[in-house]
Image (spheres, coloured by chain):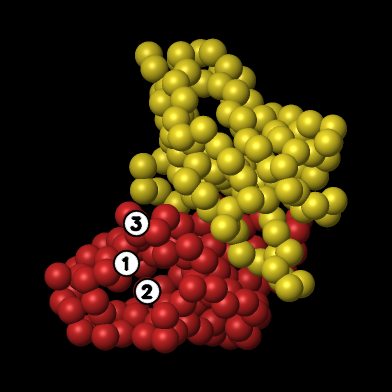
Amino acid sequence: DAKTTQPTSMDCAEGRAANLPCNHSTISGNEYVYWYRQIHSQGPQYIIHGLKNNETNEMASLIITEDRKSSTLILPHATLRDTAVYYCIVRVNYGGATNKLIFGTGTLLAVQP
Amino acid sequence: DSGVTQTPKHLITATGQRVTLRCSPRSGDLSVYWYQQSLDQGLQFLIQYYNGEERAKGNILERFSAQQFPDLHSELNLSSLELGDSALYFCASSEGTGGYQETQYFGPGTRLLVL
């Protein structure tokens, strides 16, 4: 089972910031939070990941709360091409193996013109 | 473009048949992962190979098998196909064995339709 909870869907106006929340209240100290997105049946695209500090790259920013129980992915200036399903994933240690990604149902972000 | 390539893009076959899906990882990546995405199950991990050896196994059916070759490309073999095997099959790759900090990069997928 996925260890994350995300809203099913969100809307955002083009050019505005999109803030996608994720709850991961059972996260352990050494588990990373990853974000991927999937644009209409294409392969999932890596966006960003973090442990406890805020992270930023050319695609997005990741804000992780101090208690690490939730995080927010921020797309600073959403465009129509950002319409996709966004997955928040906690890398879980399964008997010593962290290999697999557990995808939940994600958030469908619809960017409106 | 993630650098991971998959062939074919589309595959249509009949029940009971066998197919092979191919994946080439990013240059330098040693691990290959296979995932299945069906309408009712979402994205599910099937299996991982690292440098030619099976590393981790997920919800892979006994009718399915995979291997990774010395040049690091991987093949997923699906046999005795059933209607329910119709799905998108994605391959991903990563640098090493697949730890917490290791990002997996996905290919464009193969869409399999079993009639």
Q: Is residue B44 visible?
A: yes
Residue sitting nearer the eye, A61 or A87: A87
Q: Give the yellow chain's letter.
A: A
Chain of the residue where label 3 is placed in the rendered structure: B
Q: Give the red chain's letter.
A: B
Chain of the residue where label 2 is placed in the rendered structure: B
Alpha-carbon distance for marks 1 and 2? 7 Å
Alpha-carbon distance for marks 1 and 3? 23 Å
Q: Where does the image place residue A39, in percent across and percent down from the top left?
A: 42, 40
Q: Residue at x 40, y 59 (%)?
A: B41
The amino acid sitting under disc 1 is Pro
On the image, numbered disc 1 is attached to which residue?
B8
On the image, numbered disc 3 is attached to which residue?
B40
In the displayed structure, does residue A30 sit left or right of residue A72?
right
In the displayed structure, does residue A33 sit left or right of residue B92?
right
Image-quadrant location for residue A62: top right
Residue sitting nearer the eye, A106 or B52: A106
Marks 1/2 in contact by CB < 8 Å: the verdict is: yes
Q: Where does the image place residue B50, in percent across and percent down from the top left?
A: 65, 77
